[in-house]
């Protein structure tokens, strides 16, 4: 969509570990908490990458993370072997593996917390990730959680969907459009 609609993506971080750090509900099991902590550890590395290499490098790393987690179904490896997953993702994205040393570097947490807070300022607190902001810094800036799509459209169907989402997101007064998940996301 970046090429079809000529826009820039600025990658910002949102941490589910930060969002849920006060969570005490039964559904927030130790395994769930560990998964969110692994996500924070991945974000620490992404923050180090952004500081040293810039936004395009973060895009490559996010793509590598997403491929490993969603396409290759490595969610368990992320939780159990976070440093190895991060190192493999760095290699896949053409980045120096030494960035993996940042996975436990809490000096990145203040920045990740600040970006998580900004995301929630833009959308409200009852959301998750992803959060997309359209037209940042302009009078018609607007943000929302999602979209969560079971099967991503291709070609002209993708363009039509994107244009519709942008129209809805930037409509004054638009607050929410939601339904429960109908199918698990499919990656091909």
Image: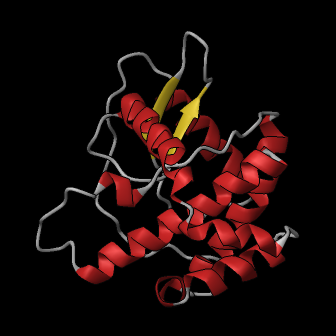
Question: Which residue is rendered at x = 70% and y = 72% of the image?
Answer: 100
Query: Residue 42, image x and y in percent?
Result: 58, 67
**Depicted 174 relative to depicted 1: above or below:** above
Front residue (pair 156, 41): 41
Residue 103 in the figure: left or right of residue 125: right
Q: What residue occupies the far top of the structure in this picture?
A: 139
Is residue 188 shown to the viewer in this render?
Answer: no
Query: Residue 27, image x and y in percent?
Result: 17, 74
Question: Which colouring convention does the figure follow?
Answer: secondary structure
Query: Residue 179, image x and y in percent?
Result: 30, 54
Query: Residue 74, image x and y in percent?
Result: 57, 87
Residue 2 in the figure: left or right of residue 78: right
**Depicted 141 relative to depicted 168: above or below:** above
Quarter of the view holding residue 165: top right
**Depicted 39 relative to depicted 156: above or below:** below
Front residue (pair 145, 13): 13
Front residue (pair 129, 151): 129
Question: Which residue is rendered at x = 88% and y = 70% of the image?
Answer: 94
Quarter of the view holding residue 11: top right
Front residue (pair 91, 127): 91
Question: Which residue is rendered at x = 80% and y = 75% of the image?
Answer: 97
**Depicted 157 relative to depicted 120: above or below:** below
Quadrant location of the C terminus?
bottom right
Residue 25 in the figure: left or right of residue 97: left
Labels in figure, total: 0
Residue 165 in the figure: left or right of residue 2: left
Question: Which residue is rendered at x = 28% and y = 57% of the image?
Answer: 20
């Amino acid at each position: 969509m970046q090429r079809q609609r000529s826009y820039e993506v600025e990658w910002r971080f949102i941490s589910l570990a930060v969002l849920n750090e006060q969570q005490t509900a039964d559904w927030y099991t130790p395994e769930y908490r560990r998964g969110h902590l692994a996500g924070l550890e991945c974000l620490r590395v992404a923050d180090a990458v952004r500081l040293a290499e810039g936004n395009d490098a973060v895009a490559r790393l996010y793509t590598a993370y997403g491929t490993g987690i969603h396409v290759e179904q490595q969610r368990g490896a992320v939780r159990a072997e976070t440093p190895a997953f991060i190192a493999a993702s760095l290699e896949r994205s053409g980045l120096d593996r030494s960035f993996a040393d940042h996975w436990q570097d809490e000096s990145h947490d203040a920045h990740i917390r600040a970006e998580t807070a900004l995301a929630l300022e833009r959308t409200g607190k009852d959301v998750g990730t992803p959060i997309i902001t359209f037209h940042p810094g302009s009078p018609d800036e607007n943000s929302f959680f999602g979209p969560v799509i079971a099967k991503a459209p291709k070609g002209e169907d993708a363009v039509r969907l994107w244009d519709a989402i942008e129209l809805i997101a930037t409509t004054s007064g638009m607050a929410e459009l939601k339904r429960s998940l109908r199918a698990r996301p499919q990656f091909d």
